[in-house]
Each structure stands twice: as structure tokens, then as C-alpha cells.
Image (spheres, helix red, strand yellow):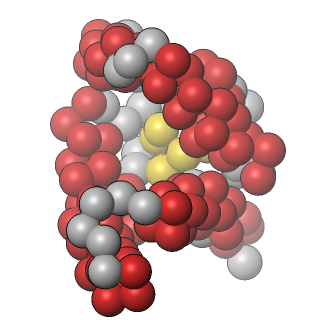
Amino acid sequence: MIQNPGGFWRRLLGILLDAIVIGIPLGIIAYILTGETEGNAFTNLLSFLYYLILPVAWMGYTVGKRIVGVRIVKVNGEKVGIGTMFLRTFVAGIVYAVTIGIALIVSAFMVGLREDKRAIHDLIAGTYVTTDKPEQSLET
């Protein structure tokens, strides 16, 4: 059951904060190690692992989502697992790439206009973004 969905602006700010807090240092490290300023396999892999593993380990949060107070959960309220996050990140990424970004734009409108604030990647993975904090029993 979907409760207290995180809206467009909070989600966008969370994505931007992730880009600043994680993307910039990752780009600097990649430049030091590879000498390349453009995205490469090293930065793409680390970025993918960040979005795949951190929400599983940290109750649905990424750094940016934690700062703005939203997290990813399954529609039934359970915490996300690796399979769920794989669907949300990798499979949805393929959908966005195949549609040349059109599905990403549609997703932005979905988050802004749908009552449940779910984007295409949420529908694929059976997730949503909520402002609810994890239950105390789940954190320990």
C-alpha cells in the first residue's frame, strides 16, 4: 500500500545531490586513475553499484535521498532487495536508453502528475519513493 509518496521536486533534488556528493568525487577519482574526463567503464560501474547496493544496505536511501528525506520501498512496504534494485536500475535504464530518453521524460511527468508519484522504473520494479522513515524494528 502506497503511503506518503515523495514528489517530483524532492526526488529531483535527491538526484542532484547524489550527482554532487557522489558524481563529482567519482569523476575526480576516475580522472586520477584513468586520465579521462568523460564517463568510462570504471565510473559507470561504480555509479551502477552505488544505485544498486546502497538502497539495499541502507533501507532504501541513497545519500541524496537521505538528505531530502525520501527513500525507495516496495509497494507492499517491504525494504528493497538486490533483485528489485536491479530491475529499478538496470532494466529501467535499458528502457530509457532504447527509447532515446523519451521514457525518462514520460517518467518525470508521471512523478509530477500521478497521485502515487511512481515513474516507469518504479512500475517495472514494484517500488515507490516515500517520505516515511523506516520502522524502528527494521533499522536494528
Q: Is residue 130 left or right of residue 7?
A: right
* Residue in the foreground of this view, choosing between 46 and 35: 35
Residue at 39% x, 80% y is: 34
* Residue in the foreground of this view, choosing between 90 and 83: 90
- In percent of width and height, residue 138 lies at 72, 65
- In percent of width and height, residue 58 lies at 60, 68
- Image quarter (top left, top right, bottom left or bottom right) of the C terminus: bottom right
Residue at 38% x, 18% y is: 100
Give the farthest residue toward the bottom.
32
* Residue in the foreground of this view, choosing between 79 and 122: 122
* Residue in the foreground of this view, choosing between 13 and 29: 29
- Image quarter (top left, top right, bottom left or bottom right) of the N terminus: top right
Can residue 120 be spotted in the picture?
no
Give above or below for 10 relative to 114: below
Give above or below for 59 relative to 7: below
Please count the marks in the image: 0
Q: Is residue 111 left or right of residue 93?
A: left
Can residue 65 be spotted in the picture?
yes
Give above or below for 105 relative to 132: above
Residue at 30% x, 17% y is: 105
Give above or below for 28 relative to 74: below
- In percent of width and height, residue 21 lies at 28, 72
Residue at 35% x, 20% y is: 101
- In percent of width and height, residue 109 lies at 28, 14
